Amino acid sequence: MTGIILFRAQPFHNGHLAQIKRAYEDLVVNGGTQLYIFVGSADKFGTKRNPLPIDLRLDLIEGSLNELYDTSWEKYIHIVPLNDLSDEANNTHSWGYYLLNQIKSVANDNKYIFYYSDRPEIALSWFNEELCKYIYFSFLPRVNNLNATHVRELIKNAWYDDLRSCVPPYVWGKAKELHKYIINAK
């Protein structure tokens, strides 16, 4: 079974990293299967909700994984930018079909385990009974209720000491670069 994670990484933080570690241990360490991380809203940046461009978000994820696993992760973990289908708040079955088609375009499997750490009803609203034939869910609790909105506020206000406990060291090292994007977001 192939693992799937979906988040926007606006910015990447310790909650995202914990999600990856859990999925990696469940799948790769115990079974040798692949893990695909879909980075959503790849086509959006420069807004308050999506201030960071996709290239920077991918760099934050890859740099953090390199610190954690060296480069050994690259054999099992694949990072895939994912454009929005429509409005980001579109929690319909259309989004579920779109997401599953994007997953199938890169992952050659018939069954997927979807690791998700936001409210379960959001993910469940995407997949109707037909789609659930392909998707199993693993709902993970948020780490210390950490979310990207809070992390963006810390960066916006240049509260870097508080930020240090919320993000991987690689991301913390880029805090001033992230600050420029966040304060200029419209």
Image (cartoon, rainbow, N blue to C red):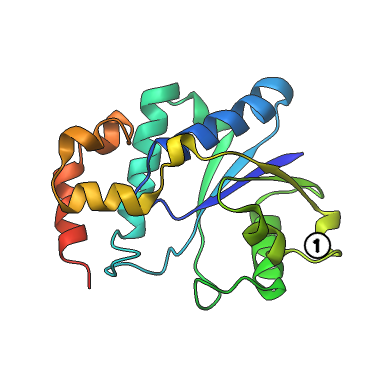
Q: In this view, does 145 lie to the left or right of 116?
A: left
Residue 178 visible, this angle: no
Picture coordinates of residue 158, whole percent (x, y): 13, 46
Picture coordinates of residue 152, whole percent (x, y): 27, 52
Quadrant of the frame with the N terminus: top right
Label 1 environment density (alpha carbons within 10 Å; few <14, some 14–19, many ≥20): some
Picture coordinates of residue 167, whole percent (x, y): 32, 36
Q: In this view, does 150 lie to the left or right of 176?
A: right
Picture coordinates of residue 68, whole percent (x, y): 41, 24
Q: Identify which residue is drawn at 34% across, 64% down.
A: 50
Q: Identify which residue is drawn at 20% across, 59% down.
A: 181
Residue type pointed to by label 1: Leu
Question: 107 above or below 31?
Answer: below
Question: 89 above or below 177?
Answer: below
- The total of numbered circles placed on residues is 1
Q: To which quarter of the image does residue 75 belong?
A: top right
Residue 159 visible, this angle: yes
Q: Name the residue under label 1.
A: 131
Q: To which quarter of the image does residue 139 belong?
A: top right
Give the structural element (helix, strand or loop) at label 1.
Answer: helix
Quadrant of the frame with the C terminus: bottom left
Q: Identify which residue is drawn at 82% across, 50% down.
A: 110
Q: Is residue 43 left or right of residue 154?
A: right
Q: Residue furthest front?
A: 145
Q: Identify which residue is drawn at 52% across, 72% down.
A: 89
Of residue 127 and residue 139, the one placed in the foreground of this image is 139
